[in-house]
């Protein structure tokens, strides 16, 4: 008979049938392989058993939060029993049941508890010992794939092949698997930026890989978690960091670059050194020969790109910095606001091209301000996208800004509108009306929105206030059922939306009209639905769905099955449904005190996944105790889940519950 090694006196001797029963308590059990042709059947009563199964054994952990490990053997049958159990599969041929053991003819596949399944691929990667998980019967709550140590190359090339095999086996058993992204290391190659020059840092190939071949979204912050400086931005789609520093930015930036697949994230550090550009050596030029002066009625340049055959003002009569187009190449006068008066003849109206190439007067719209307010243009009023699909304009402190429009939205204009309004009382607000071209195709208000560049977050977002309410109106002024205007409410000194951020009587506004889907709905199978920066409604219906809200005040409805829901930023309403749902939070920005998520009808089957939360210190659950002033404390009340991230004794993160419910520790994945 093989030897049973145990560190607990409560274990009984094996009987002749090789059956073993435990009288309770916390045990640590190591089982060596049984003799050929036989197997152990182990029943471990009590809580928090740790079992290393060996080979060819039947292990029933029974009640409690247990850890079951297949060790270096194979062909084990593992039953978690009641409780939040952890399974580690390190060898082929294991059969795993997350729930209760009765007999091989009567198996309950689920127990209503959160089970964690870890697959250590380094134990099953040998070509002569292929992966085979047979008769898989489990309700998969959390499955984590460990890629560490299985490949000398950090690109995951060896691991990915076996992960694909594992995923195929799980899918054949009706279980969907999503692995966290892989990083190529802990730090990206450092780089330097020179003042007055544009930095464009592209992530090296293989820096971040998603094993599921899903699109990653990139973000970056300073290493302490604070936002990037105003001159630097990251493209969330490509991960490219770009911007132009000034002399006041000299020094070293220590960044944290993150890649997120919507469920999990991974990060690497990046160091950017900022140096002063050398003064160019320019040879002295000879004194030019004077040329006869030519009369000019106005020195203001024509700043808008024009179609051949256009006629423009000879004088900037309203001093707005723009000599407006008077007649389009089609011979018609420009009347962008359709009031019957040419725009060039009105001091408070500026007409300019918004769509197409400007060959037709129908390509023109107009900006209109109230009496006493001055429009001002310092560049082309319509900024076209560059070859990379991004837009460049002047940001705060005169630093250039490069940004891309959010994914999933279509620009209704031929570029981004850029203008200023002046002559305001400092700190006051005003309304500006954008008249749309007569032939614009955007005509569905339910799928349209106005977005502006948010200087606080460094990206284009829907133009809303801190509560998520729109600061614009889409209007149909002539009542024909078609959008013909946008009314903007601009506030001088708004820290998010005013380009100079100062209450100085001037508001700077880059923005555009976009169209995009607001409502997303899944089918009868498992769906992955991702919203956009607008306020979305995501309906999962049946199946094990993954719903990701992105920005905006979203509504997420999981449906009947076990769903994963991440509302992203904004005050979201999240409704899990009838299954065992997972509410995923990766950052305090996902549910702030000012914009808190609300979860409707929370149950004991649901779990909060806060693994990878981006605070400076790990989260520690303190039950319903009050905050003690230690950073990273996580507490629950009957109506919310709260976290004090900076140790000031106040909540920085909060999720509200509509029903009075007290979370337990086993409902938190930290």
Image (cartoon, rainbow, N blue to C red):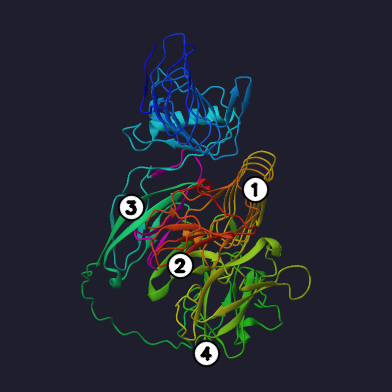
CA gap between label 1 and label 2 equals: 31 Å
Give the structural element (helix, strand or loop) at label 1: loop
Instruction: Residue 269: give its label.
Output: 3
Residue under numbered circle 4: 425
The first of marks 1 and 3 along the sequence is 3
CA gap between label 4 and label 1 equals: 48 Å
The first of marks 4 and 2 along the sequence is 4
In the rendered structure, which segment of residues is drawn in magenta? 208-236
CA gap between label 2 and label 3 equals: 30 Å
CA gap between label 4 and label 2 equals: 37 Å
- Provide residue 413's location: percent of width, then percent of height: 60, 65
Camera-side residue: 177 or 484?
A: 177
- In the image, is residue 124 above or below residue 483? above
Give the structural element (helix, strand or loop) at label 2: loop
**Chief secondary structure of the magenta span?**
loop
Q: Nearer the viewer, mark 4 or mark 2?
A: 2
The first of marks 1 and 2 along the sequence is 1
Residue 376 visible at all: yes
Q: Nearer the viewer, mark 1 or mark 3?
A: 1
Instruction: Residue 558: give its label.
Output: 1
């Amino acid at each position: 008979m093989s030897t049973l090694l145990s560190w607990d006196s409560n274990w009984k001797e094996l009987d002749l049938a090789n059956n073993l029963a435990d009288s309770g308590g916390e045990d640590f059990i190591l089982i060596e392989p049984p003799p050929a042709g036989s197997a152990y059947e182990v029943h471990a009563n009590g809580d928090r058993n740790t079992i290393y199964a060996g080979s060819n054994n039947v292990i029933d952990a029974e009640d409690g939060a247990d850890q079951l490990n297949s060790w270096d053997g194979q062909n084990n049958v593992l039953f978690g029993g009641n409780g939040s159990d952890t399974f580690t599969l390190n060898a082929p041929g294991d059969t795993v049941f997350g729930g209760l053991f009765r007999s091989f003819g009567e198996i309950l596949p689920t127990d209503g508890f959160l089970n964690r399944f870890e697959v250590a691929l380094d134990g099953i990667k040998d070509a002569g010992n292929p992966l085979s998980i047979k008769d898989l019967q489990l309700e998969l709550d959390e499955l984590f794939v460990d890629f560490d140590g299985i490949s000398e190359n950090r690109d995951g090339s060896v691991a990915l092949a076996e992960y694909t095999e594992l995923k195929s086996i799980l899918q054949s058993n009706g279980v969907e698997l999503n692995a966290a992204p892989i990083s190529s290391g802990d730090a990206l190659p450092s780089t330097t930026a020179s003042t007055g020059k544009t930095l464009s840092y592209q992530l090296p190939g293989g820096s971040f890989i998603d094993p599921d071949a899903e699109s990653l979204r990139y973000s970056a912050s300073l290493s302490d978690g604070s936002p990037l400086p105003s001159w630097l931005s990251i493209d969330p789609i490509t991960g490219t960091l770009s911007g132009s520093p000034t002399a006041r930015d000299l020094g070293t930036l220590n960044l944290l670059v993150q890649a997120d697949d919507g469920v999990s994230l991974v990060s690497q550090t990046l160091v950017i050194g900022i140096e002063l550009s050398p003064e160019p050596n320019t040879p002295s030029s000879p004194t030019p020969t004077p040329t006869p002066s030519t009369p000019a009625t106005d020195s203001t340049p024509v700043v808008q790109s024009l179609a051949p055959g256009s006629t423009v003002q000879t004088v900037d009569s309203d001093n707005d910095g723009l000599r407006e187009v008077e007649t389009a190449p089609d011979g018609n006068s420009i009347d962008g606001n359709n009031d019957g008066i040419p725009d060039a003849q009105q001091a408070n109206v500026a007409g300019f091209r918004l769509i197409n190439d400007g060959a037709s007067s129908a390509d023109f719209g107009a900006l209109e301000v109230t009496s006493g307010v001055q429009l001002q243009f310092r560049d082309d009023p319509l900024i076209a996208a560059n070859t990379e699909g991004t837009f460049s304009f002047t940001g705060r402190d005169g630093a250039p800004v490069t940004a891309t429009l959010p994914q999933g939205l279509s620009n209704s204009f031929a570029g981004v509108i850029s203008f200023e309004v002046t002559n305001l009382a400092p700190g006051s607000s005003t309304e500006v009306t954008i008249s749309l071209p007569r032939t614009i195709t955007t005509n569905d208000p339910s799928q349209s929105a106005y977005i502006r560049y948010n200087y606080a977050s460094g990206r284009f977002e829907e133009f809303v206030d801190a509560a998520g309410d729109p600061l614009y109106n889409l209007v149909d002024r002539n009542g024909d059922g078609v959008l013909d205007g946008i009314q903007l409410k601009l506030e001088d000194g708004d820290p998010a939306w005013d380009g100079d951020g100062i209450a100085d009587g001037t508001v700077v506004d880059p923005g555009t009209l976009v169209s995009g889907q607001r409502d997303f709905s899944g089918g009868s199978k498992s769906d992955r639905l991702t919203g956009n920066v607008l306020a979305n409604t995501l309906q999962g219906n049946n199946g094990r769905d993954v719903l990701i809200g992105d920005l905006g005040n979203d509504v997420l409805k999981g449906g009947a099955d076990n769903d994963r829901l991440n509302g992203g930023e904004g005050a979201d309403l999240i409704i899990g449904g009838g299954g065992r749902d997972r509410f995923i939070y990766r950052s305090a920005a996902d549910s702030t005190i000012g914009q808190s998520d609300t979860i409707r009808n929370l149950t004991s089957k649901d779990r909060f996944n806060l693994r990878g939360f981006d605070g400076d210190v790990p989260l520690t659950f303190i039950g319903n105790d009050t905050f003690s002033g230690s950073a990273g404390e996580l507490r629950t009340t009957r109506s919310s889940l709260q976290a004090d991230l900076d140790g000031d004794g106040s909540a920085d993160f909060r999720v509200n519950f509509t029903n009075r419910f007290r979370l337990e520790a086993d409902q938190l994945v930290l």
